[in-house]
Image (tube, grey):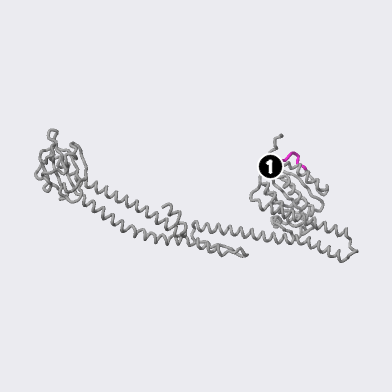
Amino acid sequence: MSRWIRGPLPRLGLRARLLALGVLGLVVGFAFGGALLLGALGWTLQRSVDEEALRTADAVALLTAEDALPDPLPVAGGQLRVQVVDAQGRIRAASIDADRLVPMLGPDELRPGQRQRLVVDGRRAGMPGPVRVVTVPAGTPQEPRTVLVAKSLTDVRHSLHVVRNLLLVGFPLLVAGLGVVAWRVVGATLRPVEQLRSGAAEITGRAGAERLPVPAGQDEIHRLAVTLNDMLDRLAASRDRQRAFVADAAHELRSPLTNMRTELEVARRLGDDTDWPAVADDLLADTERLSRLVDDLLLLARLDEQDARPSPVGPVELGELLRTVAARYPSPPLRLTPPDAPRWVEGDAGELRRVLVNLVDNALRHAYTGVELAVSGPDGAYHLVTVTDDGPGIPAADRERVFARFTRLDDARARDAGGAGLGLAIVRELVRRAGGTVELADATPGAAAPGLRATVRLPALAEPEPE
């Protein structure tokens, strides 16, 4: 059977496999149940025969003890044969239809003084088929007797035979009926799965709504369809982001390339009148912008490929990190407010430096007079790093949107020299990898130029032990 299950069964369809397994279970279950039923019925009928024979034997034994045996012995019904034999095996009394010369049990089968239950050939008792013979001790110690009572097992065998035939005839019909019901039920159960398969086959990956049919029943298949649709929504959103990213990246890369090509074409037309040092400076500026854009795109691509945040490199002291970043800029316009005590966080020093550089560059492009870089807090289990400018600020409705890639606003923070709309997107990804968050808020709420304060929350770390 194990070879059959491993062999032909996997070549069947799921519906047929489920039905085959169900029918196999029914066959095994009914076979076991039928055998159990026949055994229980046979045991019950045999017990009934024994009880009737023992009651008769006990009644005859009581008459024997009172020395009041009638001749012939009275027996209720014609299915019993009764004999009373002495210690020498001679018949002392018998029922009207019992043999008065030959005992139903031979001397080698009798156990004087013991109750016995035996099945013998019915010819010994003058009855057809096998008979059940019980023995009960009787008489007195001086004159021991044994009462033998035989009852035919023909009715028992006939009853078992009828039940067995009914099971043999009814069992296949019952299995066939249950198989038909199971086939319909399994088909109805798998119909939503087939609908899901058909819906999945129709999904092409092109733009547009791509949804799987959701069955009405609140069952496992319904939940599977909902989960798959959620997955399709996430994949569609990811695909849309990738398409937008590719389109925006192509547009940003084309702008400096177009500028470079235009400058070279103009320089070639002017010939000897071309100011080649000025052309070289313009080309170098476009090349630097193109290089920064490519570096940002590569960094975002690398961050997208990493499914989980890697283990932090090691402890980083924020005061030293801020001084390193501030050394890149003149003072003013950048003002540094170092922390009053060492503030330790765990992370990649290079990535955290990139976060602060991007925030400071963004703030310096839009500040009127200057930018302040400081560490505040701690705020619970976090240290706060703030970058504050006094520029026009960002409306509250746009503060989340500016973290999207290639996002520029239409106000004073619109396209400017060197900006591609990737700086804040990189900041959010790197801060998330460090286990922190970044938020934007007004520096001076209610003012005409409220400015902007970028707050980076980084998990605090206890001061490391000196080595």
Place of residue 323 in the rendered image (x, y in percent of width and height, measured from the top left): 78, 43
**Overall secondary structure of the magenta stretch?**
loop
Name the secondary structure under disc 1. Answer: strand
Residue drawn 20% across the image and 39% down it: 115
**132 falls in the magenta region:** no
Q: Which residues are magenta?
A: 338-344
Above or below 408: residue 327? above
Furthest-top residue in this view: 142
The image shows residue 354 at horizontal and vertical percentages of: 74, 49
Instruction: Identify residue type, mark 1.
Output: Ala
The quarter of the picture where the C terminus appears is: top right
Return the residue found at the far left. 71
> In front: 340, or 435?
435
Residue under label 1, please give it. 460
Question: Foreground: 112 or 322?
Answer: 112
Residue at the far right in the pictured view? 273
Residue at the image point whose x is 44% and y is 60% from the top: 16
